[in-house]
Image (cartoon, helix red, strand yellow):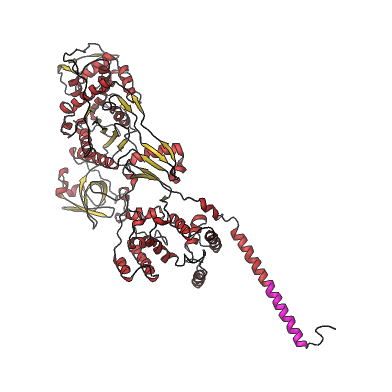
Amino acid sequence: MSLYENLPPVEIGGRRIVGRVLFGLLVLVAALVGATAGMLLVYTTDLPQVDALEAYRPSSITELYDDHGRVIGSFALQRRVVASYDDFPPVLRDSLVSIEDKDFYRHSGINFWRIVGAAYRDIESGGKVQGASTLTMQLARNLFLSPDRSFHRKVQEAMLAIQIERHFTKPQIFTLYANQIFLGHGVYGFEAASEFYFSKPAKKLTLEEAALLAGVPKGPAVYSPINHPDRAQKRRNLVINALLEDGKITAAQAADARSAPVVLRLAHDPNSLAPHFVEEIRRYLEGKYGADQVHEGGLKVYTSLDVDVQKAANQAVLDGLAAYERRHGWKGRLENVVSEGAVLEKYSHADWDDEPEAGGYVHAVVTSAGTGIATLKFGRYTAALGQPDVAWTQQKLVDILKSGDICYVKILSLGGNGAARVSLEQDTGAQGALLAIDNATGGIKAMVGGRDFNESKFDRVTQAMRQVGSSFKPYVYTTVIDGGASPDDTILDEPISFETSSGPYSPHNYDDKFEGIITLRRALAQSRNIPALKLANKVGIKSVIEYAARFGITSKIPPYLPVALGAAEITLLEQTSAYSVFPNDGVRVAPRYITRVTDYEGRVLEEDFPEVKDVISERTARIMTSMLREVVLHGTGIAASKMPFPVAGKTGTTNDFTDAWFVGFSPTMSCGVWVGYDEKKSLGAKETGAHAALPIWMNFMAAAMAGKDAGEFQPPPIVAHASQKVDTPDTAPAAEEGH
């Protein structure tokens, strides 16, 4: 008998309906599970393996350091300084968690209720799912996913966040996030942001500073404290309120922090200190290690440069060029951005990208100009010029400046309220270069390759081949002294003709005078041309060129007699390094930029030691040093005789005053200065090496050697009092004037 025979018909039908409903529900659940599994399978296909994060290292900055460990430059695709969890102070960690993810330390990667709330709001507004990401989800997106806000990406983001939480601790996740996040202006990570915005490490952030940084990730462009300080301040105060709600700070602390103004101390671009030096190193590193390693590998490059010496070099060159410009009067011909179609209020000059400093030189735009005053702007600073400020131009203010003009100014002082004091200068294109080398190590301590790296990347220290004028003469005298001559030997300074293929040529001295019988010491000190030509002719110009090569002159020099007066094109690097042989007792130490390079882990990739080579005898070196000392004490470089420590060197001037040189040294440092135009036009009448280059050299050396033991030159060997005449009447090809 059937089990259902005794049951009423209604009850039997009800059981059948319930069974069918249960079966249908089971089918529906199975379908949903299958669909969900399929969806997850689709969305998680090709997702990266988060365990790879254990070996993950973000792209980081390659930094360059000076000889005291101070940063002088960097190379990076993303400006990031990788820091540890403990490098981020509690106030920064609390600020970020309070505003971005209050349940960070409690959830397992996603915050379900936050997602539901955000989804509900987005459905109401018709938008896409957004505003529900935890820090872990943001990290997953920044590391592995695209920035779009699609549902597909959100699911992948959540799945990755869960995996990340399973593999890493909260401090590890926070550290990864804090090093990865973009914080505007090319800066990634909170350590780099702290150094960029406040010029200090994150460990030293105050409450209001930490809150300001914590507010930036929501919109680095929108909440930039540089471009939008008002928005940044409002966002910062929201972070402070969130900290107060979470009990992380007191009401008094919150009130004080909210009332504090936004004060930035923007870090100077380290590459702007010695840009030509940094560029030389970049080319070398990329050639050896490759561009990817240099710009992403986080190398540590230790260099020979000295920040303080470099600053002195920058100032000396710019001040020297400004003095030159003033000597030759106002030329005008200013660029006007308004006439070129620019909007004055929106104009920005490349000089303004870096924070200005008192003593620096910048291009400013004239915002208004009248009969008695002109107002200028550079960056966030304004300044005014009156008629007394432009008196040196010998023109009326209204005639030389008008609204929209770009003028060149020296910053005299900077006020906290954005007001500045400036002096009007000009830039007609005259260039200067300076190189300073440590005699003992060959280390380059300062290098100025031109007036303005933003205007011209051309390096006039290493790339410019210029005639060196009479600064070449020491090689002539070295050849003679090394052959056994004495500085007290005599030579006849008199009119002479040299036979050439085109006929007789009669060179002359700079002053068109002749001194008769003079010693070699005086001939060099007074930079007499005729004695130098006679000496070169006696020993052979090829011998002189061979000696120059021993000093490290690698530029090709043609073997004809005018080379004795500097009719040879040589770089400032070669010439300055060569002169260091004299105070080094005849030993050449090859110039060097880098002392050590390490990789991200601190492993030494290369270590550079001084490369030394004997060039001339100790006797010759000390005699030549004493003769070059005579140039300073009683010769063409006499202006340097007032230096408070012993120096020696040689002036150099080429025909038509196109190149002005002074290359000299103290017992510990050699320095070369060149002044001229790139197109090899005249600097102007009487702009000799002593007039244009030597003042720059003196100002630099005085600042660079201040407070240091300059040492003493070693005395030359005792020479016989009787002099020998080394004059010869031989003839040779024509010579050019030099000084």
Q: Position of residue 550 (x, y in %)?
A: 33, 22
Residue at position x 44%, y 36% in the image = 287
Q: Is residue 385 above or below residue 432?
A: below
Q: Quadrant of residue 553?
A: top left
Q: Can you say which quadrant of the picture contains the N terminus?
A: bottom right
Task: Determine the residue located farthest toward the right in the rendered image.
Answer: 1
- Where is residue 401? Give x, y as percent: 21, 49
Splitting the image into 4 quarters, where does residue 643 fall? top left
Q: Main secondary structure of the magenta part?
A: helix
Residue at x-position 55% and y-position 64%: 151
Foreground residue among 80 and 382: 80
The answer to if 266 sits in the magenta stretch is no
Q: Can residue 662 be seen from the camera position used here?
A: no
Figure quadrant of the C terminus: top left
Q: Position of residue 42 (x, y in %)?
A: 61, 60
* Residue in front for this viewpoint, 446 or 90: 90
Q: Magenta stretch: residue 26 in it?
A: yes
155 versus 20 height, above or below: above
Magenta segment: 5-27
